[in-house]
Image (cartoon, rainbow, N blue to C red):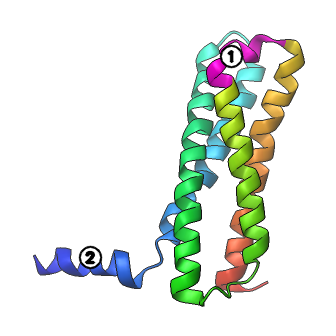
Amino acid sequence: MDFFERLIYALTETHPLHAMVVHFPIALTGAAAFFILLSLARKTNRNLEQTAFANIALAAVSIIAAGITGLRDNMLYYGNQAPNTGSKIILASILLVITSTTALVRWRKQDLFEQSPGKILYVSAYIVSFILALVLGFLGGVILYGF
């Protein structure tokens, strides 16, 4: 039992939670962008677009978790003085809006990928989401490793 107590203490008190959670939005937006581009290349396979949609929807949820843990860790470990905090909050908010909007619109309009006018914007949202996640990851790395 001592091991589990130490593990729980380390996870909740000594180790920043954000560092563990933040990888989900990066991976999920990257996977979503990959699958949406793959579905463009293979026009006959609708499953790839559905996989991209599932990833972007999960990314939206994981962004909320990453944001909450980031704010928590900033308070606990950096005294609200972590570098680029304002920029990261703004970019993460934009990322949340883009991923959530993309997932909600696609959920309500399941044939969005087949429609020419909306398709370009739809695919672009995936790519922009991944780019924003990468920029946020870089800014997080600045906190740990410097510029």
Q: CA distance from mark 1 to mark 2?
A: 44 Å
Task: Name the disc covering residue 132, or none.
Answer: none
Q: Is residue 49 visible?
A: no
Place of residue 85 in the rendered image (x, y in percent of width and height, measured from the top left): 72, 76
Place of residue 102 in the rendered image (x, y in percent of width and height, measured from the top left): 71, 33
* Type of amino acid under label 1: Lys
Query: What SS does tag 2 mark?
Result: helix
**Which of label 1 and label 2 is nearer to you?**
1
Place of residue 56 in the rendered image (x, y in percent of width and height, measured from the top left): 62, 38
Q: Main secondary structure of the magenta part?
A: helix
Of residues 103 and 23, which is closer to you in this image?
Answer: 103
Residue 119, picture quadrant: top right
The residue where tag 1 is placed is 109
Residue 125, picture quadrant: top right
- Asked if the stretch drawn in magenta spans residue 107, the answer is yes
Q: Identify which residue is drawn at 84% across, 20% down.
A: 118
Q: How many marks?
A: 2
Place of residue 15 in the rendered image (x, y in percent of width and height, measured from the top left): 42, 80
In the rendered view, does 1 fall on the left or right side of 25? Answer: left
Looking at the picture, does residue 114 appear above or below residue 130? Answer: above
The residue most toward the left is 1
Q: Is residue 97 visible?
A: yes
The residue where tag 2 is placed is 7
Looking at the picture, does residue 126 appear above or below residue 50? Answer: below
Q: Which residues are magenta?
A: 106-115
Q: Identify which residue is drawn at 73% across, 48% down.
A: 130
Disc 1 residue crowd, few under 14, some 14–19, many 20+, Cα 10 Å:
few
Q: Identify which residue is drawn at 19% across, 78% down.
A: 5
* Type of amino acid under label 2: Leu
Image quarter (top left, top right, bottom left or bottom right) of the N terminus? bottom left
- Asked if the stretch drawn in magenta spans residue 75, the answer is no
